[in-house]
Amino acid sequence: MFVTKVYLFSLLILILSNQISSEPIPLTDKTWKDMLCGQWMVEFYAPWCPSCQYFTPIWSDFAKEMISKEIKVAAVDINDYPSLSGRFRISVLPTIYYVRDGVFRQFNGERTLSGLKNYIELQEWQRTDPVSSFVAPDSLPMSIISSIFDVSVLVKDAYTILQDTYGWPSWLIYIFFTVVIIFVGLVLGFGVLMIIDYCVTGTVKDDINNLADDSKDVEDLDDNDSQKILKPKTAPSSVPKLIASSTPQRKIKSNISSSVTQTQDDEALLDEILGDDNDDSEGLNTSDMAQATDEDEQTPNVVIRQRRVNK
């Protein structure tokens, strides 16, 4: 009699455990990462959706069938966890994902018990392209989108509290949220500017330090090296040639003015020579100017003598 009771009690526990485990596993925004290990079939639904209500018994039967396949069947209520709807990009209800070792595939087959079983048993999931790693639910962009959904939920809850608990009118709540958003934007913008200014200022300081190091190197030069660096360059040797080349032109000009008297001709020629020499001597250093002046003092006398011989 005692053995019979123990047997019946064990059988009852086994039946209850199977019944409990046959139901879809509820996932939340805290436990959704459990699906990254092993094989999972996850349904996203909403209680108000007629299609979800029709699909609920099928999904429960599928969970019972998958007990022996070591495939976990789960369900997510997007009304309770809207951030997961943003993370998984839910646009149609119900949406089903097949997850295998962290790789996500969206199920697009028949929403029947046979269609779900064939997808697993016949490995039809291999025909489905995996979700890109950039938009996968565990990627950084999807995490940001999930955070935005969380913020929207907080704003909605705050609106409800201000209106129901404190009795604020709608227009006052909108003004309050507008002021808060502007303030947050200013704080974030100021923070970004401070970061940029810090980065740029650090770069400028580094450049100034480098310049300081270069100046130290210049100070370390001895007197001989500094004199070599500061030594002026000599003027090119072509300057005397330019002065000499102007002599034939002055001779040609003296022949053109043959109708003028000798005294006037000599004075005009002397003035012209001195004026040309002054123009040619600009930009030269002191030594070259002295050499050019000596040559110019001799040139007028030679020209005047030739002029008198010709006449």
Image (cartoon, rainbow, N blue to C red):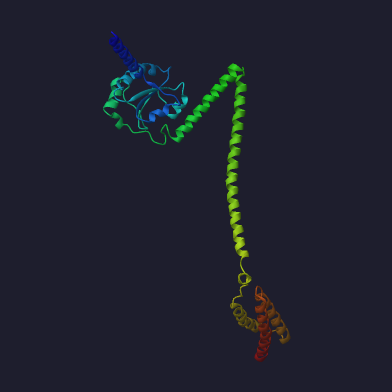
Q: Quadrant of the N terminus?
A: top left
Residue 51, given in percent of the width and then of the height, sits at 38, 18
**Would residue 11 appear left or right of 30 to someone viewing this image?**
left
Residue 22, given in percent of the width and then of the height, sits at 34, 19
The residue positioned 66% from the left and 79% from the top of the image is: 287
Residue 113, given in percent of the width and then of the height, sits at 30, 20
Q: Quadrant of the C terminus?
A: bottom right
The answer, for residue 258, to whether it is visible in the render is no
The residue positioned 60% from the left and 35% from the top of the image is: 187
- The residue most toward the bottom is 309
The relative height of residue 109 versus residue 209 in the rendered view (above or below) is above
Q: Quadrant of residue 229?
A: bottom right
Q: Which is nearer the eye, 86 or 245?
A: 86
- The residue most toward the top is 1
The relative height of residue 269 versus residue 14 in the rendered view (above or below) is below
The answer, for residue 287, to whether it is visible in the render is yes
**Would residue 55 appear left or right of 207 to someone viewing this image?**
left
Q: Quadrant of residue 197?
A: top right
Count of picture labels: 0
Q: Which is nearer the eye, 261 or 125?
A: 125
- The residue most toward the front is 2
Q: Quadrant of residue 109?
A: top left
**Would residue 229 appear left or right of 81 to someone viewing this image?**
right
Q: Which is nearer the eye, 207 or 181?
A: 207
Residue 170, given in percent of the width and then of the height, sits at 60, 20
The relative height of residue 213 versus residue 234 in the rendered view (above or below) is above
Q: Which is nearer the eye, 164 or 171?
A: 164
The residue positioned 61% from the left and 21% from the top of the image is: 171
The residue positioned 50% from the left and 27% from the top of the image is: 150
